[in-house]
Image (cartoon, grey):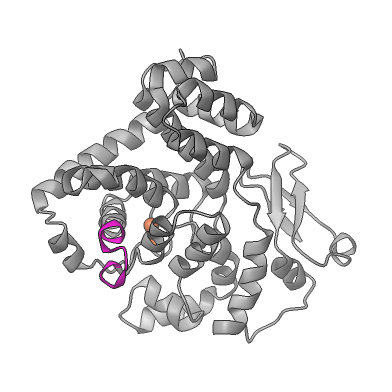
């Protein structure tokens, strides 16, 4: 079985003999860069020729996917501890930095992001305690959220035709757009909107291999029907990536308003969290319009005008949001 590392993009082979004894998802270290790669049980069975068309659909497919979701690591302890610190009025940024320091891999990413031009002083944030001093609790927690999302989203998605950079660029664009929209519409939603934007497409990570193996069916359906990609997912799989994102968010014990907002990001007017879902939907549409992270699904995006009306977003607002997003993405990748 050919496995591609999303970190260094090297490909390597796992022999059938090694795969045969597996009874669940496995984690292998990339021989080139050492990054852990999760190979799902479904893909293992497929590589061994144990799964053939016609492919699973609807509830049966959901059972297979639920197994994959189970195999995805939980949110690291640092996420849970950090949330407690942020909610505690007696703690401060230095305590938060101390918590982050306990997880070396996350700490390294936090430092890298804290040194990006957007967060201030490139090259000068030499330690987490210094980051705490410069950024304060709120911004440091935001940087941690980004670092955690990066560890989840760092995947190469062959089905959706998004490489690691594409999906990351898109997530950053949508997160920053969500912030810009929330600031205009309801500033109290700013932090939730940013986090929801960052992780809105996490369901794609789980669904990708299923899209990939049904690629011919997708292409045919999209050619024939005048539908968006969500419509194609629902027709061919029986559900869409936002629903799978909801299962992941539940596994990661995200607050329900955030998980629900993500669940309805393509159908904001049906959402029990209309405001937050509409913010993510509009920001997603603006990122797609700006060409930030367009994959196989980006060309067919149904934009819900009612969401724009509900949040009173005018053309001039869209231009301002685009500018903010462009600037943010540039500074974050600079
Ligand atoms: Fe989406
Ligand atoms: Fe998206």
Stretch of the chain drawn in magenta: 268-278
Which residue is painted at 31% across and 55% down in the image? 280
Tell me: 136 left or right of 50.
left
Q: Nearer the viewer, residue 203 or 221?
A: 203
Which residue is painted at 25% across and 53% down in the image? 286
Which residue is painted at 69% across and 41% down in the image? 35
* 18 relative to 213, above or below: above
Tell me: 35 left or right of 292.
right
Q: Nearer the viewer, residue 114 or 45?
A: 114
Query: Could you say where residue 56 lies in the image, as x and y percent from the top left?
Result: 61, 83
Where is residue 137, by image quadrant?
Answer: top left
In the rendered image, residue 137 lying in the magenta stretch gets the answer no
Tell me: 16 left or right of 225.
right
Where is residue 251, by image quadrant?
Answer: bottom right
Q: Quadrant of the N terminus?
A: bottom right
Answer whether residue 177 is visible to the viewer in this image. no
Answer whether residue 64 is visible to the viewer in this image. yes
- The extreme front residue here reads 90
């Amino acid at each position: 079985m050919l496995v591609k590392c999303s970190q260094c993009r090297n490909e390597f082979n796992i022999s059938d003999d090694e795969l045969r004894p597996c009874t669940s998802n496995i984690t292998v270290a990339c021989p080139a860069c050492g990054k852990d790669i999760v190979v799902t049980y479904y893909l293992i069975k497929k590589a061994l020729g144990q799964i053939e068309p016609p492919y699973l659909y609807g509830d049966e497919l959901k059972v297979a996917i639920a197994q994959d979701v189970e195999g995805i690591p939980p949110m690291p302890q640092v996420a849970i501890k950090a949330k407690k610190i942020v909610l505690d009025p007696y703690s401060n940024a230095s305590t938060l930095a101390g918590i982050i320091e306990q997880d070396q891999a996350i700490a390294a990413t936090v430092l890298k992001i804290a040194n990006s031009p957007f967060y201030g002083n490139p090259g000068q944030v030499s330690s987490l305690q210094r980051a705490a001093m410069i950024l304060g609790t709120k911004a440091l927690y935001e940087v941690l959220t980004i670092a955690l999302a990066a560890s989840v989203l760092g995947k190469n998605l062959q089905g959706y035709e998004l490489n690691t950079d594409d999906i990351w660029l898109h997530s950053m664009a949508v997160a920053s757009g969500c912030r810009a929209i929330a600031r205009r519409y309801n500033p109290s939603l700013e932090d939730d909107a940013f986090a929801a934007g960052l992780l809105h497409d996490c369901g794609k990570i789980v669904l990708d291999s299923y899209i990939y193996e049904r690629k011919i069916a997708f292409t045919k359906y999209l050619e024939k029907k005048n539908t968006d990609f969500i419509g194609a997912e629902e027709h061919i799989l029986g559900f869409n990536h936002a629903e799978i994102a909801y299962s992941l968010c539940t596994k990661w014990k995200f607050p329900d308003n955030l998980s629900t907002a993500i669940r309805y990001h393509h159908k904001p007017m049906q959402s029990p969290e209309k405001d937050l879902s509409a913010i993510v939907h509009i920001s997603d549409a603006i990122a797609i319009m700006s060409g930030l992270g367009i994959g196989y699904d980006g060309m067919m995006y149904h934009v819900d005008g009612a969401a724009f009306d509900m949040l009173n977003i005018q053309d001039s607002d869209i231009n301002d949001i685009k500018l903010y997003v462009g600037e943010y993405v540039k500074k974050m990748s600079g």
